[in-house]
Amino acid sequence: MSHETTPPAADPRRETLVVFALSLAAMVVSMMQTLPVPILGLIRADLGTSAANVSWVTTATLLSAAVFTPLLGRFGDQHGKKPTLVAVLGVMVAGSVVAALATSLPLLILGRVLQGAATAIFPLALSVLREEVRPQKLPGAMSLVSGTLAFGSGLALVATGLLTSGSDADYRSAFWMATGFAAIALLAVVFLVPATRHKTGGRTDFLGALTLGATLLLLLLPISQGHEWGWTSGRTLGSFAAAAVMTVVWVFTELKVREPLVDMRMFVHRPVLMANLAGILVGFGMFANFLGVSYLVQMPEALTGYGFGASILRASVEFLLPGAIVSLLASPIGGRLVRHRGPRTALTLAAAFGAVGFGWLALDHGHTASVIGAGVIVGAAVSFGYAAMPAVIMASVPHHQSGIANGINSISRSTGSAVGSAVVTTILASQTIEHLPAGVPALPAESGFTLTFWIGAAAFALVAVIARLGLRTGQAPRTERVSAPAAETAEASEKETAAA
């Protein structure tokens, strides 16, 4: 089967509207991941639940994304990207309304599960761009849509801080805000994104989706809950062991199915594999920055000897917002880098900026200017990294697998974020200040933050290794017609990689 990848006749205004609509949709879905982070305490108090139970408000979204993103990414490739986008956005609107109206924790978690399914928007959006944007504009368009992910995650923290800054704050206002953004994104996609032109058809590999979903659930559940369960507890170790077994089952299933959800040759193809490893590390760095800085600046200096005693509002607006804005501004720069120098250069710069930013935080987190400046550098690093990864994937897989390939990469970033959250939480909980006044809850020692930031620097240093050793020079998004099967395409690209 031949798959036409050439976009329609050039219409700059039409392209701009499509990119705007998809960027808005990607920004909104990224907001859903970090939205409840600043208000977990309010939710726990309002619903009268425990800290362990309320953590499911964030975990449920992550697990839902892990299950639905690959399935919906492939479904969009097969049956139409715009209808799938519209349906997913409709589910996100419904989930936001459920979360805003919830009067119990189970209902709130249901709403968060529905919101998490919308993570499939990102790979679907990149597949639409590949159809609708001219080749010379494609890297910039993908980078802009990718850059909105980091911006949206930061914006959610800031907006939630603003909405819940009063003494009588109601956490539900944050979910009503999410409902409004989701509805606007839905309308933008309905009216600005053209109908799907390419459909591969075929059967949906539900068995592959089921085994992949089970694998990811068993992997991400102990990562996100390990701090509460205990890292050496039977539940944690048992879940990791079960994840390993299910990985084998999933691979065996995909090798036997006639039309697999994930082509194993594509999955282990070196550029795709390297992009996914980079996604884990960049996602880790983004969350380590968000959580590390947010917790750091809220520490009461009078009791701990460090920190700024900032409120949630000040932490969001003064310390996190600058980095979020820079991440958005850096995305078109990342697109130009990808277009003119290739994603390898963009990923190398992301690694350099990230290592420098986290190193700066580790060495000096006692001055406002240092914390803000380092956060800005890390924000640019995340944006460059997110700009490079879709370009690597688009250059390495045939058109009809772009949705599932970017879906897997989206999961890798979510996995990295989950690991980042778990690592930061565990480090700060394990290194606490001794001899605090009676009645004062345990507070993290400054050494915990220093260690967190050094680990973030190390993560970005590993991104540099991936960029230099795992990717070939000059790789740019593929724009020609693709008629070879995925296996032949991967094999030919491997020969190109070996020759580079």
Image (tube, rainbow, N blue to C red):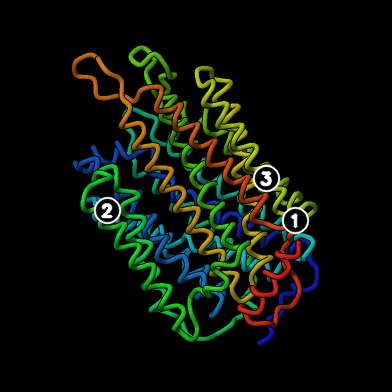
Sequence-first disc among 3 and 2: 2
Sequence-first disc among 1 and 2: 2
Label 3 environment density (alpha carbons within 10 Å; few <14, some 14–19, many ≥20): many
Mark 3 or 2: in front is 2
| Element marked by disc 1 | loop
Which residue is painted at 58% across and 29% down in the image? 374
Q: Nearer the viewer, residue 36 or 383?
A: 383
Label 2 environment density (alpha carbons within 10 Å; few <14, some 14–19, many ≥20): some
Discs 3, 2 touching: Cβ within 8 Å: no
| Element marked by disc 2 | helix
| Element marked by disc 3 | helix
x and y percentages locating residue 229 in the rendered image: 23, 46
Sequence-first disc among 1 and 3: 3
Q: Which residue is mark 3?
A: 348
Cα–Cα gap, marks 1 and 2: 41 Å
Q: Nearer the viewer, residue 85 or 238?
A: 238
Lateral position of residue 394 relative to residue 217, left or right: right
Q: Which residue is mark 2?
A: 237
Q: Which residue is mark 1?
A: 473
Which residue is painted at 55% across and 32% down in the image? 358
Q: How many marks?
A: 3
Q: Residue furthest front?
A: 498
Q: Is residue 359 visible?
A: yes
- The disc labelled 2 sits on which kind of residue? Leu
x and y percentages locating residue 377 in the rendered image: 62, 34
Q: Is residue 97 visible?
A: no
Quarter placement of the C terminus = bottom right
- The disc labelled 1 sits on which kind of residue? Thr
x and y percentages locating residue 1 in the rendered image: 65, 87
Lateral position of residue 455 relative to residue 483, left or right: left
